[in-house]
Image (cartoon, rainbow, N blue to C red):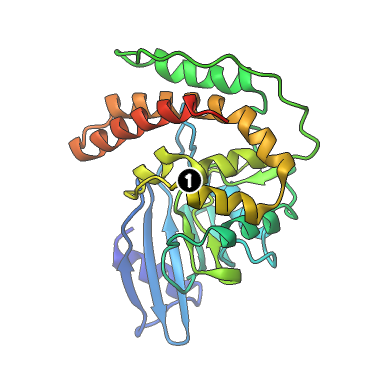
């Protein structure tokens, strides 16, 4: 939509008027996102691009709307205002505050709050090391150039006792601070392992793709101390090499198929650090 079309649509829904301001937000790789400022209220309007297949991060507007409904009242995500599938448009309340900048305990506490959400009905993602590694191999198979590395042997991982509603792409999709911290951009949620969300936050490649430096060992230690779940720390140590191999494959594929030289260089850097992360001792 153009700005005029979006204004007209939101006016018809009673969400905008003549005094409403519109500003396109930066940072998204795919969807078009607007900040909508009306007297007394600030909103975000997200117009979805076509759904994607063959990627780790499908673009699923119906699922984002449902995830925001499930997370209502948990102090985890923005509050849903409305969703119009026919227009591929989602509107939620604007989260006040700055982008997350290093408060590790707040992220740990948010992930624990998120565990109260019901994951039933969402797409399933792999839960075992062999299946996660197989996804990575499928991405590498699309590439013209394979790295010299190979996946580490897949250890046995205890059966998951509880599925979680996972975001799958946390990175730095975090706004606010302390108990007001919120996780945004829920367009690829899934029913899976909370360790997948922990990975998409701690992974150096996810941070680099968000144009940040990888987290330091001090920051990572602060996260685990705040989480205070040694069971998850042990499980994560077993799954981390598989997650890293899979995401390295994704980065290798993206670096070959995208056309923007700067973004491709970012994916190549992410690929290298992720292969190192795969080999990092537990």
Q: In x, y percent, where is residue 212?
A: 34, 50
- Whether 146 is drawn above or below 74: the answer is above
Q: Which residue is mark 1?
A: 217
Residue under the image location 54 percent in, 29 percent down: 243
Q: Residues within 10 Å of mark 1 (few under 14, many from 20)?
A: few
- Whether 219 is drawn above or below 58: the answer is below
Q: In x, y percent, where is residue 273?
A: 37, 32
Q: In x, y percent, where is residue 106?
A: 58, 62
Front-lying residue, 200 or 219: 219
Helix, strand or loop at disc 1? helix
Residue under the image location 43 percent in, 50 percent down: 48
Front-lying residue, 81 or 93: 93
- Whether 189 is drawn above or below 130: the answer is below
Residue under the image location 72 percent in, 47 percent down: 229
Work out whether residue 184 can be spotted.
yes
- Whether 87 is drawn above or below 9: the answer is above
Q: Quadrant of residue 24?
A: bottom left
């Amino acid at each position: 939509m153009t700005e005029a079309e979006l204004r007209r649509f939101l006016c018809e829904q009673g969400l905008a008027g003549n005094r409403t301001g519109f500003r396109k937000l930066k940072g998204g790789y795919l969807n078009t996102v607007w900040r909508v400022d009306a007297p007394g209220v600030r909103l975000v309007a997200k117009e979805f691009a076509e759904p994607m297949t063959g990627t780790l991060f499908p673009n699923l507007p119906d699922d984002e709307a449902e995830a925001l409904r499930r997370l209502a009242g948990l102090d985890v995500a923005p509050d849903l205002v409305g969703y119009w599938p026919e227009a591929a448009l989602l509107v939620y309340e604007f989260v006040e505050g700055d982008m997350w900048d290093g408060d590790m305990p707040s992220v740990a506490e948010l992930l624990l709050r998120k565990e109260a959400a019901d994951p039933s009905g969402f797409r399933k993602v792999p839960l075992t090391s062999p299946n996660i590694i197989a996804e990575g191999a499928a991405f590498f198979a699309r590439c013209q150039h394979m790295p010299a590395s190979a996946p580490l042997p897949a250890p046995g991982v205890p059966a998951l006792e509880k599925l979680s509603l996972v975001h799958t792409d946390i990175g730095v999709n975090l706004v606010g601070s302390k108990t007001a911290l919120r996780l945004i951009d829920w367009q690829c949620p899934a029913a899976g392992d909370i360790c997948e969300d922990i990975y998409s936050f701690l992974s150096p490649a996810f941070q680099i793709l968000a144009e940040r430096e990888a987290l330091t060992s001090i920051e990572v230690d602060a996260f685990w101390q705040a989480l205070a779940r040694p069971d998850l720390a042990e499980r994560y140590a077993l799954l981390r090499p598989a997650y890293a191999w899979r995401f390295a494959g994704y980065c290798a594929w993206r670096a070959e198929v995208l056309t923007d030289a700067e973004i491709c260089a970012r994916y190549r850097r992410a690929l290298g650090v992720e292969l190192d992360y795969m080999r990092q001792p537990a």
